[in-house]
Amino acid sequence: MILIAATKLFEELLETLEQLEQDNRGVLIDPVPYLKTSNHFMNALQSLVLTGSFDGQRDEILFFKTVKPKFRSFQIYYLALHEIIFKKPKGCKKVLKKFYADEIQKICTFRCNNQHIINYYYSGANDMDAQLFLRKVDEHPHWLIRPKLDRDERFSTIADHLVGKIVAMDKIQAYLSEEMAKLHCTSFIENTPVGKKQYRWTGEAINLVELAYGLYYTGEINNGNAGIAEIVRLFEKIFNVVIGKPSRRFAEIKQRKRLSKTKYLDQMKTAIDKRIDEDDEFVPKLNLR
């Protein structure tokens, strides 16, 4: 079944990109290896589709609406990142600020030009799915700006590439916003008086993994655009601890049998609830004298 195989392939893609992040820790990012990896997995995904078959139109729509765009978004993101780094001018903060602002404006223009499909995609609507996410369909919504299709029509619909680009734009804007923020202020952790104080994680490292994945899956950092490896590296830096490969530590959590899968998060909740209950029960005695 294509959907099951594609899901496993996407997990492999994430693990490979995560390993690249681990190997290049502390080094200025070079998007080329990431782009090559994304291209490799996209080719593998295409082979799945060309050699297999979908179990009906519902599966085909699901694939081209949600699965393929995730793969494509990484390709678009790393290609755009490569171009941004290549075009980045050398100069003062004012020059760099204008450069990043211009790049963000391009994203805003893209969103304005494709507002209909963006609204449709994020609203969860499905009434036009057959027109947008089935192959070889001639009729499409009048508001759709048709992008360049893949060369092989067996592996593309009228809107899947556009959805991938929409997802990628969010990642690109997050990167640009971070770069602009660096121009306005220095790192809080490294340069504030508090940041100079050394903090050490004295609990089990696996507990930090629970926290990291909790933040990752709830999308609380950078509008959900921070990768799990980035979050783990941040924790390692703040707390002077070595966590290791996040996916392997997460596998330890999933393999728990006797304990809760979220043992540490459960302990935190219990501790907070207990403190709140204690505060609510405390009634100060009135001094009637």
Image: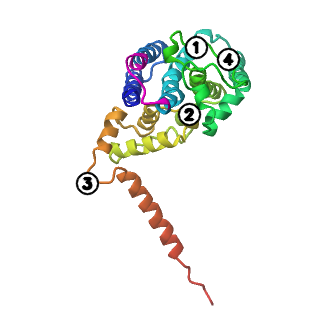
Left or right placement of residue 289 versus residue 279 in this view? right
Q: Label 1 near label 3: C-beta < 8 Å?
A: no
Measure the alpha-carbon separation of dots 4 and 1. Answer: 34 Å
Which residue is tagged 1?
A: 149
Mark identifier at residue 258: 3
Which residue is tagged 4?
A: 96
Residues drawn in magenta:
45-57
Say what amino acid the circle numbered 1 marks. Answer: Leu
Which of the two residues, 7 or 238, is positioned nearer the viewer here?
7
Measure the alpha-carbon separation of dots 1 and 2. Answer: 48 Å
Which SS class for mark 4? helix
Say what amino acid the circle numbered 3 marks. Answer: Arg
Which SS class for mark 2? helix
Q: Quadrant of the C terminus?
A: bottom right
User: Which of the two labelled residues, at mark 3 and mark 1, occupies the earlier sequence position?
Assistant: 1
Measure the alpha-carbon separation of dots 2 and 4. Answer: 22 Å
User: Which of the two labelled residues, at mark 4 and mark 3, occupies the earlier sequence position?
Assistant: 4
Q: Label 4 near label 2: C-beta < 8 Å?
A: no
